[in-house]
Image (cartoon, rainbow, N blue to C red):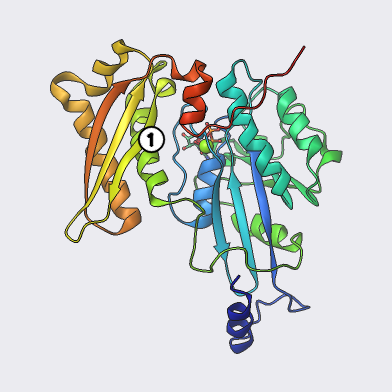
């Protein structure tokens, strides 16, 4: 790819920061964990941009998102993944299929655990960790800012330390402990090429972030089952000289969910639109006109055709 370019740059500006052998290291880090462990918060903290949407509700992330960190001596591609639960339906299976893709690519695997979670890792998560061919596995204990001093060294329940190369204690929210985590990660990466342009911080297109920004606001401002019934789709994205024009359709599963999202006198939809637009403008750096529509796609989460149409990877049904 841009290998030539990279060698020139680093040769021109040697720093004390270089690996002893001076080799360029690169690779993939899969961030795995239960829903709500803080995977997306960690991805954002490592990259220094709000790439992945975050909410206090489980199962916010539905897709694999790469965040790319490039310096003169390494390129790390962090893969945020959906939280792993034991799947009960086709939709959940499709989320786990995303995790499986990330595991296949990983050189280093982070098992991120919420330090305050009293429950051990579930069977699907343990299975995913066991299957990885990653050369290093880290147990990353997150949210240590929530612990009292006497709890700081406690290990999460149900983890087998023998399965991990190293243990880290971090706060993704407060950006604590990230330097040590990053250093150890780079040390485990193989010598390798630049996979992405050094300027690039994600593998996703602007369209993806536009849809996600809208979905995030719905996760923040609606409750119960509504956020889970929502799929946001960019139906038009035009870069225009004065203002970009983006039309996003918010699909819900039931007619009764429509007025919840629209709100009294359209107030909530307006707020979702304004805040999502501001996020999009921050990311693209261009003024934007964001138009939102709410439509019903009955029970789309249960319908394989709709799931595929919305870009979910639905694994073949297992015969039992
Ligand atoms: N106190 C504290 N809260 C955190 C920390 N990291 C994440 N959180 C919070 O935990 C909640 C879940 O964070 P996310 O980053 O969305 O978690 P996730 O693992 O990506 O969740 P899913 O996408 O649903 O699997 C949010 O409310 C975050 O603000 C942390 O280090 N400390
Ligand atoms: Mg997430």
- Tell me which corner region of the image, top left, top right, bottom left or bottom right, holds residue 94: top right
Number of marks? 1
Up-down: is 148 above or below 8? above
Callout 1: CB less than 8 Å from ligand 1: no
Q: Is residue 113 visible?
A: no
Task: Check the picture and name the quadrant holding the C terminus.
Answer: top right
Tell me the residue at 77%/78% (across/down).
20
**Is residue 317 shown left or right of residue 61?**
right
Tell me the residue at 72%/67% (across/down).
192
In percent of width and height, residue 125 lies at: 71, 30
Up-down: is 229 above or below 49? above
Q: Nearer the viewer, residue 299 or 56?
A: 299
Q: Nearer the viewer, residue 147 or 161?
A: 161
Q: Residues within 10 Å of mark 1 (few under 14, many from 20)?
A: many
In percent of width and height, residue 22 lies at: 73, 79
The residue most toward the left is 265
Q: Secondary structure beneath disc 1?
A: helix
Tell me the residue at 26%/58% (across/down).
286
Q: Is residue 56 visible?
A: yes
The residue most toward the right is 162
- Tell me which corner region of the image, top left, top right, bottom left or bottom right, holds residue 225: top left
**Is residue 209 shown left or right of residue 191?**
left
**Is residue 271 shown left or right of residue 227?**
left
Q: Nearer the viewer, residue 291 or 37?
A: 291
In percent of width and height, residue 1 lies at: 61, 70
Residue indicated by mark 1: 216
Up-down: is 304 above or below 161? above
In percent of width and height, residue 314 lies at: 60, 27
**Is residue 23 shown left or right of residue 300?**
right
Tell me the residue at 59%/39% (across/down).
81
Q: Nearer the viewer, residue 271 or 117?
A: 271
């Amino acid at each position: 790819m841009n290998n030539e370019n990279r060698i020139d740059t680093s040769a021109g500006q040697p720093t004390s920061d270089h690996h002893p052998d001076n080799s360029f290291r690169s690779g993939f880090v899969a961030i795995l964990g239960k829903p709500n462990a803080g995977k997306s918060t960690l991805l954002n903290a490592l990259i220094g941009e709000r790439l992945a949407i975050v909410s206090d509700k489980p199962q916010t992330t539905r897709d694999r998102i790469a965040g790319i960190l490039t310096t003169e001596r390494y390129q790390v591609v962090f893969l945020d993944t959906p939280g792993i639960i034991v799947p009960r339906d086709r939709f959940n299976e499709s989320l786990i299929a995303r995790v499986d893709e990330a595991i296949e690519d990983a050189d280093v695997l982070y098992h991120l655990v919420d330090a305050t979670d009293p429950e051990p890792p579930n069977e699907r998560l343990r299975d995913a960790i066991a299957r990885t061919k990653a050369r290093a596995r880290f147990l990353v204990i997150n949210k240590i800012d929530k612990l009292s001093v006497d709890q700081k060294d406690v290990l999460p329940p149900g983890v087998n330390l023998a399965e991990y190369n190293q243990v880290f204690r971090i706060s993704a929210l407060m950006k604590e402990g990230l330097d040590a985590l990053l250093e150890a990660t780079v040390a485990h990466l193989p010598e390798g090429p630049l996979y992405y342009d050094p300027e690039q911080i994600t593998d996703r297109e602007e369209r993806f972030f536009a849809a996600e920004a809208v979905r995030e606001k719905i996760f923040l401002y609606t409750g119960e089952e509504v956020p889970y019934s929502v799929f946001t789709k960019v139906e038009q994205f035009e870069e225009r000289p004065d203002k970009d024009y983006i039309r996003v359709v918010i699909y819900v599963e039931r007619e009764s969910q429509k007025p919840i999202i629209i709100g009294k006198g359209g107030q909530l939809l307006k707020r979702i639109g304004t805040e999502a637009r501001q996020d999009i403008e921050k990311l693209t750096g261009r003024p934007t006109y964001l138009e939102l529509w709410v439509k019903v796609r009955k029970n789309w989460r249960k319908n394989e055709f709709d799931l595929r149409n919305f870009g979910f990877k639905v694994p073949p049904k297992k015969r039992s």
